[in-house]
Amino acid sequence: MSDKIKETVLAASTPAPGEAGRTGDWRSQTPEIDQEKCSQKDTCLLCWLYCPDGVISREFPLEIDLEYCKGCGVCAEECPRKAIHMVEGREAAS
């Protein structure tokens, strides 16, 4: 591959909420954020970075758009402080 082509070929994806429609009813588990454990002052945002659906806010306190969240659990897996946990069902506990 020529150097010119290498410079212009990028593998970048920026998911946006709703690309597959409102898919929140696909969930069997729902993520919940413990805002006390969340590393807000460190501005970690790993959950936002790794969310394949792009449904986590970048502002604190973090929010997850449950209309589009498929409940994959990637955010909970990537959180270094274990501030996100998955609960059974489609609705967040009150």
Image (tube, rainbow, N blue to C red):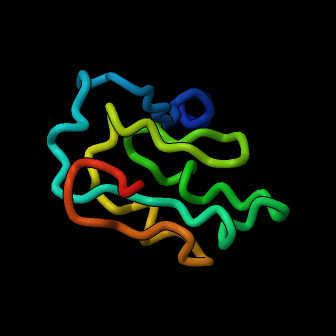
Q: Nearer the viewer, residue 55 or 90?
A: 90
At 36% from the left and 39% from the top, the residue drawn is 66
Where residue 22 sits: x, y (%)? 25, 25
How many badges with numbers are in the image? 0
How far across and down, in percent of the image, does residue 89 sit?
20, 57
Give coordinates of residue 7: x percent, y percent.
62, 33
Compared with residue 63, is residue 32 higher up or lower down, i.e. above or below?
below
In this rendering, would 4 be left or right of 56?
A: right
From what the image shows, is residue 57 above or below residue 37?
above
Q: Residue furthest right?
A: 41
For the point 64% across and 62% down, which residue is it? 35
Q: Name which quarter of the figure residue 85 lies in.
A: bottom left
Give the vertical position of 48 relative to 67 (above or below): below
- The furthest residue to the front: 94
Quadrant occupied by the C terminus: bottom left
Residue 27 image offset from top left, x and y in percent:
19, 49
The one nearer the camera, 24 or 80, is 24
Picture quarter containing residue 59? top right
Q: Nearer the viewer, residue 24 or 15?
A: 24
